[in-house]
Amino acid sequence: TKKLQPLQNFLSLISRRGSHLARQQYDVIVVGGGHAGTEAAAAATRVGAETLLVSQKIQTIGALSCNPSLGGVGKGQLVKEVDALDGLCGRAGDWAGIHFSILNRRKGPAVWGPRAQLDRQRYREFIQSELLSTPRLTVLEGSVEELLVSEPNPEEPGHHRVTGIRLANGSHLISASSVVLTTGTFLSGSLFLGQSMSPGGRIGDAPSSAGLSQTLRERLGLRIGRLRTGTPPRIVKDSVDLSLAHVHPPDSHPTPFSFLNTHTRCKPEEQLPCYLTYTTPGVERVVRESLHLNCHIQQDTKGPRYCPSIESRVLRFPGRQHQVWLEPEGVTSDLLYPQGLSMTMPPDVQLRLIREIPAMHRAEIHTPGYGVQYDFVCPTQLSPALQVKSTQGLFLAGQINGTTGYEEAAAQGLWAGANAARWALSMPPVALSRTESYIGVLIDDLVSRGVTEPYRMFTSRAEFRTSLRPDNADLRLTLKGFEEVGCVSTLRYQEAVRVRDSLQDALAALQALSLSTHNWRKKLPDMCMSEAKSTLLTGMDVLQYNDVSFEMLASAFPECLLPHMEFSQRLKIEAVYRPHCNLQKKEIERIQKEENMSLPQDIDYFSLPVSLSQEVREILDRVRPSTLGAATRLQGITPAAIVHLLNYVRHTG
Ligand code: FAD
């Protein structure tokens, strides 16, 4: 991990770059310096585009608006994939992390969720410092008031082309071949606290100007929806009695997010604990008594289902105790972030509420919680490259597409930025499929199904999750990122090639070890093995056993296996999942071969005795595709649904 420059130096430098070096023409302009925008700008430059990043405030570039954490179940996979494509957030997480843990450890490694609690300031500093040292990137402080678009082409009615941006407070125009909009919660944003509502994108920040929303809605005719989210109050750490909460230690050995890092900046012993506590009946009482003072909760707009406010939790599940995690905000911060206590009631009621929890009976609030409502663009209007279908050169990424979360934003930002650069440099768009990445799942879900509530990633959304593991994101994506997309540096590519080749050698060595069960028992006396005596098993077969580790095999066969110790954990995971992944691969190939298989036209999709969601059944019933291939191309039909359909028709036909 590299050394960071002092922030002050950086800010003065970057501002100078902004005011003096901004040109009138760029290949790509990225609007917004949040998690989507910073990844988009960095990816566009890696592909080779002269890029301008415009954001309202330089000092909030890379800011964590809500929770000081990165990763988790499903989200951690996205961070690993962004890193595999040479993005920023994985390395930023390794730099800023102060409490690392792998969630879901009791389940298989495919669904492990790498997560870290972050130091807010360090995270922002890392992202800002990275952007400063990025070649071909200019950063400008400013607010974009309007998108410049050409008149529709008479030969393609309704098709506009983006030509640049207009900055607020004046007529400063900057042109570009492509523009990536990543306005987060700021597009026509309104903040809610108690009974008051004021314009804003985040506390202390103005909303994105109405002009931008207007261009999207009126000039480009895009369908726009409205969503909401909220954040908890920040609590003064010294005012909390942590002895009344359960200590939750980090993993003893922090696992870095980035494939380039072997360790995190924070040493194992320097990590900070989190604390777990619970709500009481008093919390529920305060929520109910204050509903009439809480205008955010009275809105119909949809909020995040999986990160609900305490008001929603209490109203949905009355009488229950709810978890509240008290998380450190940073190494030197004197604040705690109470995860699970998002709330929008008046500040005095917020104080009353938190004091109903024993560990916080004398707690002080530093900043009250609040809610935000914002415009989003219905993402079915985008292509898989995240380009607006009806406007050439216009790309959207992040919360503006109806998602929630830093990781979802970063993943889209990277992909939109890379494609925006490719568009500007006259290269064809690139897409990621659901079978090769979580980013592919995320984008496919957005552009083919759309959203009705803030979308967040889960491992259950990925049908091929046993292949899309956090441990193999580099093998899945780094080579493609270098060879086909152009967003990966040579250095990272060479490292991925080294890893791929070494793993192949190690797997060949394991495969070459072929012994009878009897001989394996002699070599590994502690192993429980149910196979008959005469069965021949390879090293790969034996490594699938729960009680066999690569280390055990290496000490039994040091000559051929000890050279591969660097990859012991990856080899174990590979051995466990390989049979299942091979089956899945065969299924995918089978579907490709059976493209022309006819689907009976009188099939009753609602009563098919196979595992299909109601949504999938409705689509199939409505469209009645004539072949399996036609079904595959329908929006909203997942590869898993196609496998079930194929098996059913084969079986009955
Ligand atoms: P943001 O991080 O919001 O960044 C947008 C950037 O665009 C900002 O830098 C802004 O200054 C800039 N910008 C906007 N308009 C313009 C313009 N016209 N010109 C120039 N710059 C502009 N996520 C969760 O996962 N769970 C939660 O519970 C949760 N709660 C949240 C609560 C609140 C109150 C807020 C504000 C956010 C919350 N988030 C939550 C969302 C999380 O912050 C976002 O998912 C993530 O930051 C989205 O990244 P983004 O890049 O799309 O947008």
Image: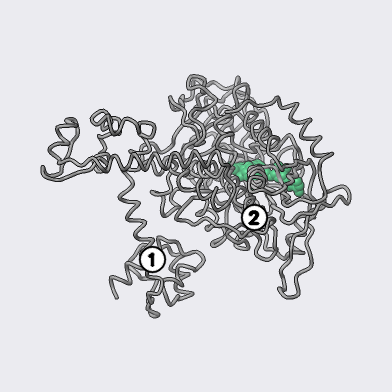
Q: Quadrant of the N terminus?
A: top right
Residue occupying the far left of the picture:
533
Residue on which disc 1 sits: 591
Q: Of helix, strand and loop, which one carries label 1?
A: helix
For label 2, count other residues whose C-alpha is less than 10 Å away and answer few (under 14), some (14-19) or many (20+).
many
Residue 347: percent from left, percent from top: 68, 34
- Image point (55%, 25%), residue name: 265
Classify residue 434 as left or right of residue 453.
left
Ligand 1 shows up in which quadrant of the image? top right
- The answer, for residue 8, to whether it is visible in the render is yes
Relative to 69, say whether 427 is above or below.
below
Q: Nearer the viewer, residue 480 or 121?
A: 480
- Image point (28%, 34%), residue name: 560
Asked if marks 1 and 2 touch (Cβ < 8 Å), the reply is no
Relative to 472, say whether 608 is above or below.
below
Residue on which disc 2 sits: 422
Relative to 557, say whether 450 is above or below.
below
- Image point (50%, 24%), residue name: 273
- Image point (58%, 42%), residue name: 489
Disc number for residue 239:
none
Residue 78: percent from left, percent from top: 52, 45
The amino acid on which the numbered mark 2 sits, given as a three-letter code, is: Arg
Residue 425: percent from left, percent from top: 68, 55
The amino acid on which the numbered mark 1 sits, given as a three-letter code, is: Ile
